[in-house]
Image: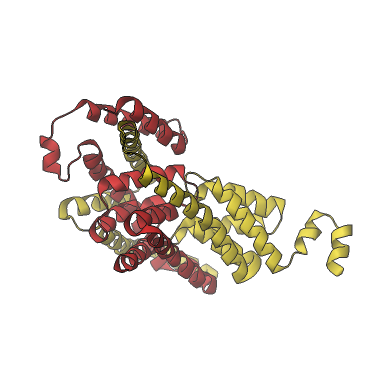
Chain colours: A yellow, B red
Amino acid sequence: MKRDTLAMTGNNIELHQTRNKIQKGFLLFWIYLKSMAFAFTGGMAAIPLIQFDIVKKYKMMSDDDFVQIIALSHALPGIIGLNNSILTGYKIAGVFGALMCSVGTIMPAFGAMLVVAVLFQKLPQSKIVKGAILGIRAISVAVIFDVAIRIVNRFKKNAFGLLIILTAFLIPLITGVSSFYAILFSGLIGIFYVSFHNQPNERDDTKKGN
Amino acid sequence: MDRIITLFLMFFKIGLTSFGGGYGMMSMIMDEGQRLVGLTRTEFADMTALDLICSGPVAVNAATYVGYIKGGFWGAIFATLGCILPSVIICTIVILFLNSFNKSKIVKGLFAGITPACGGLLLYTTLSLSKSVFFNTNSFTDMLHSPITAAMIVMVGITGAAMIADLKYKINPAFLTLAGAILGMLFLSK
């Protein structure tokens, strides 16, 4: 009853604040589903759309909070888009919110890829189809290379970063071990580097904090 | 059944050790896929390109595709579950211990080391991918001895044009994939 009167008299903001957790969960599911369905270049492409809906349109979270979650989901291992949806969903509507956001994130990606995979296997092996596949493969080399170049560019002025890039390139090339070990090795080197290199600054920060 | 468990564990491991998004996992998907479920380099190249025309997180796309071609429908389901589970576990830990996480030097160090490593690994992936896509061989010595054909030159041309279009003019990769398919139909079907 109370909720109804608020909805009738109040403006939009009050109306949306009166949603309970279950309603918020379903709204989040819909926001994530439709944004992810149009994110063709990966989960990050959907983030601006989601930010608009959650922060501006439905006012479920402040802009600062959302930006903080974006930064955090980048820093965590795992799938960035999914980290973002779990953290956002939990903050707005608890465990149910996190669940609905995750399902909304995964469903379009899983569904679309399954359909494409089935169609791709069933395609007739004609010369034209084979030509198209060769063309697509040539594009994939370019796309992977460009992602590598963008990462290298980020570390242009960072000698430590460039050294790690070179090491990670040479380890699988020369020794033939799996990239998993190159990642593990680089992570350990990173821990050593940060704990010795940044020590003075870190101490200052903790003193201020205390 | 064994295959499905292998797919699940493989993508769990990949999800857990990937920093910096889906493209960072690509080199691991190629290596581990080849070792554990017999994913060929050309299948990997198809996956990379099809990722671009499917919406949603790249990692989920990749897991679904590899799971489907190596383990059928249930393979796709369990590979996808395997790659999302690390995110779920890690986000739960973060929600529980958010404050100490932000200050942790170990986390900062891991991130500082693994992000550039992804760049180096992707360069390696490009090299070994171009070896199998352009030359259709499995070792670098075979590559040097294989004859240069017209199709090879066309494919290198398409790759070069796509690199420039993507890096310099920032053309949506989904359109590049479509353009690659059309150019392939016109010049590479013989």
Q: Is residue A159 left or right of residue A35?
A: left
Can residue A169 be seen here?
yes
Q: Is residue B98 left or right of residue B115?
A: right
Q: How many marks?
A: 0
Q: In this view, does A25 lie to the left or right of A170?
A: right
Can residue A198 be seen here?
no
Corner quadrant of residue B182: top left
From the top left corner, tell me how far across and down residue A83 is, in percent: 50, 61
Residue that appears at 31% across and 48% down: B44
Residue that appears at 26% across and 47% down: B41
Between B61 and A202, the one nearer to me in the picture: B61
Image quarter where the N terminus of chain A lies is bottom right
Q: Is residue B76 above or below residue B101?
A: above
From the top left corner, tell me how far across and down residue A103 is, in percent: 55, 61
Between A190 and A35, the one nearer to me in the picture: A35
From the top left corner, tell me how far across and down residue A71 is, in percent: 52, 56
